[in-house]
């Protein structure tokens, strides 16, 4: 299945997430599957425009926590999350820790200089509920990869 001719649909992604999740890391995702996950969550699940939910996350992480520079707009915040998901260097983590059986997918990428605010860190984490195909949040955890490692899941990418 080629990404350009036949992008993955919701059902394909759900089946892929469950198969990879149930294998708990013993089944490796192919490069094509990783590209499908990035495309699906980055282009189809993450909102394309600013809405009240994105504004709430923007307020929490940009204005309140100061993880992004103070002059960051909501559009720039959303763009930084999308770029993190789509960046082939960003890692991908899968967990069903909360609630059990409900998979979450994390995209973990480096913070570019333009995205680092006074309360920022070296990593951006973008989280989705993989069962409901819903954006949860995007932020810069103080402890970077250690935050993700503590979520009781496993790394899908890099292999």
Image (cartoon, grey):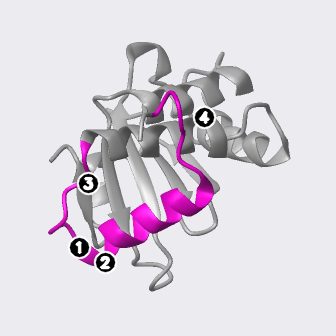
Where disc 1 sits, the SS reads: loop
Q: Is residue 9 above or below residue 74?
A: below
Label for residue 22?
Answer: 2
Rendered view: 78 above or below 95: above
Looking at the image, tell me whether mark 2 or mark 4 is earlier in sequence order.
2
* Circle 2 residues within 10 Å: few <14, some 14–19, many ≥20: some
Q: Quadrant of the N terminus?
A: top left
Q: Which label sits on residue 11?
A: none
Element at badge 2?
Answer: helix
Q: Nearer the viewer, residue 123 or 133?
A: 133
> CA separation, marks 1 and 4?
26 Å
Circle count: 4
Q: Earlier in the sequence, mark 1 or mark 4?
A: 1
Residue that mark 3 sits on: 156
Of the numbered discs 3 and 4, the one sitting upstream in the chain is 4
Q: Which residue is mark 1?
A: 24
User: SS of the residue at dot 4?
Assistant: helix
- Sequence-wise first label, 2 or 3: 2
**Residue that badge 4 annotates:** 43
What residue sits 64% from the left and 66% below the top? 132
The verdict on residue 26 being magenta is: yes
What residue is at 41 percent from the left and 53 percent from the top?
Answer: 106
User: What residue sits 38% from the left and 27% below the top?
Assistant: 87
Answer left or right for 155 relative to 26.
Answer: right
Q: Range of the magenta residues?
A: 3-30
Crowding around mark 4 (Cα neighbors within 10 Å: few <14, some 14 to 19, many 20+) is some
């Amino acid at each position: 299945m080629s990404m350009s001719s036949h992008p993955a649909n919701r059902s394909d992604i759900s089946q892929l997430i469950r198969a990879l999740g149930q294998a708990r890391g013993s089944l490796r995702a192919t490069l094509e599957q990783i590209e499908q996950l990035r495309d699906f969550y980055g282009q189809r699940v993450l909102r394309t425009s600013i809405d009240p939910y994105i504004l709430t996350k923007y307020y929490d992480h940009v204005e309140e926590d100061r993880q992004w520079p103070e002059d960051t707009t909501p559009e720039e915040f959303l763009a930084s999350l999308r770029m993190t998901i789509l960046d082939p260097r960003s890692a991908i983590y899968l967990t069903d820790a909360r609630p059990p059986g409900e998979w979450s997918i994390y995209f973990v990428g480096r913070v570019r200089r333009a995205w680092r605010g006074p309360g920022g860190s070296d990593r951006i984490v973008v989280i989705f509920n993989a069962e409901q195909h819903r954006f949860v949040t995007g932020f810069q955890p103080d402890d970077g990869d250690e935050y993700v490692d503590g979520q009781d899941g496993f790394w899908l990418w890099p292999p």
